[in-house]
Amino acid sequence: MRSTGFRRTFVVFTASALALTAAGCGGSDDGSAGGKTRITVNCMPPKSAKVDRSFFEADIKAFEKQNPDIDVVAHDAFPCQDPKTFDAKLAGGQMEDVFYTYFTDAKHVVDINQAADITSYVKDLKSYGTIQQQLRDIYTVDGKIYGVPRTGYSMGLIYNRELFQKAGLDPDKPPATWEEVRADAKKIAALGGGTVGYADYSAQNQGGWHFTAEMYSQGGDVVSSDGKKAAVDTPEGKAVLQNLHDMRWTDNSMGSKQLLVINDVQQLMGSGKLGMYLSAPDNIPILVKEKGGNYKDLALAPMPGGKGTLIGGDGYMFNKKDSPEQIKAGLKWLDHMFLTPGTGFLGDYARAKQNDAPVGLPEPRLFTGAADAKDQQVKKANANVPVENYQAFLDGNQSLQMKIEPPQAQQIYSVLDGAVSAVLTKKDADIDQLLKDASGKIDSILVRG
């Protein structure tokens, strides 16, 4: 599923911001103007996101001062990429020289021949070798490099420390298996007063998204490794649905209201009535700023199951029309803006803290080695949230397999919504039949491609 692309200050966007689209034209012919190399870039925060916008503009100005031979023209948009217009913009030659993509877009952009091969240029990108290999691999297709990752997220288990204590559970020892999730949820629900032990999504494709995350956590998958066949009708698939069914109907730990979506679950957690749910770290400030939650009560654990977690994120690719000078300039810009620990749009934690943005949230580590140590050091020095509440998540993630969303993700999620909603709304749901039906539908989706 998608995230906003603006992950530092978590600004609440107004309705008018949603109507903004990327302005101006896309890639230029050779990018040269007045002796300068000109590059267009996107994903600049809209004017309604005042703090993020000011950071972005200041960072571009600093970059141009350091590189007087490069002219950066930024286009704003929210969201950074609109899936409805993305392909048309590429095909119509309107895409920027350096353009934002989700992880799941990388292979598709290459397949439709709209990305520049930057393999011979990344040697000049100072930060490239410090980025996690598994994230670099996302933008590597058939041994060639087509993009650079910028941020990532991974799913984990958000839980309410106060409810854990009230239920006699140790808030410093979150559940590590789905059996433990079930047991803890039952104790939390027993507190009464409308308290729900565990909640899950089951509508608007969000149920299928979480089903996928839960499959990954147990070592399963939703499609085969070659992406051609469904892989849900398996012991892991049955375990996911059986566990949800049993928590809902045997334990009564998931509450009677179902067909929930993300906002419903966030409202429950923010009001202090929910023990646990799956999410990425960027839910935490939303729970505090919009839903009434408190940072000290909210903690994050790694995905139960211990085998894998669903990851997402974004990066930048290069227009196939870019000149060598534009590619080199774009890589320099990425280094300056996003990929130098402790500085830039995403790494200047001191600046973020001064502007009352949350610092210390457990984003997955983009870097390795000395770069990672520097990033963590600067983040820790400027943290203004209880980082100890997220240490289990950071530690646990180191041993999990990181897996991106499946091909044709939204269509597959729609199918899996039906299976998840069925077990949560029908006590006599036939799990074997649900998985068999879902498998057939997913096969059809993959054949159509």
Image (cartoon, rainbow, N blue to C red):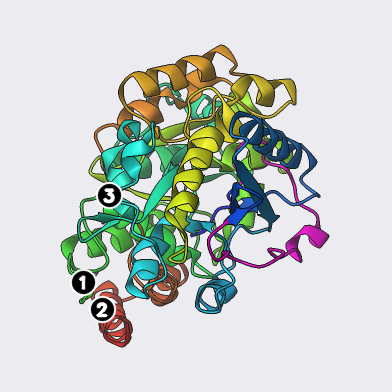
Who comes first in sequence, dot 1 or dot 2?
1
Q: Of the numbered discs in the image, which one, if any, rests on residue 49?
A: none
- The secondary structure that most of the magenta stretch takes on is loop
Q: Is residue 134 magenta?
A: no
The alpha-carbon separation of the residues under discs 3 and 2 comes to: 28 Å
The residue at the point 66 percent across, 50 percent down is: 34
Q: Residue 80's x, y, as percent?
A: 61, 57
The alpha-carbon separation of the residues under discs 1 and 3 comes to: 28 Å
Which amino acid type is shown beneath numbered disc 2?
Ser
Mark 3 or mark 2, whichever is nearer to me: 3
State if disc 2 and disc 1 touch (CB < 8 Å): yes
Which amino acid type is shown beneath numbered disc 1?
Asp
The span picked out in magenta is 6-31
Q: What residue is shown with label 3?
A: 137
Q: Is residue 131 above or below residue 105?
A: above
Q: Is residue 7 magenta?
A: yes
State if disc 2 and disc 3 touch (CB < 8 Å): no
The alpha-carbon separation of the residues under discs 1 and 2 comes to: 6 Å
Nearest the eye: 115 or 47: 115
Residue 274 shows in this picture: yes
Q: What residue is shown with label 1?
A: 233
Which amino acid type is shown beneath numbered disc 3?
Asp
**84 lies left or right of 164:** right
Q: Residue 20's x, y, as percent?
A: 75, 63
Who comes first in sequence, dot 3 or dot 2?
3
Q: What residue is shown with label 2?
A: 439
**366 lies left or right of 256:** left
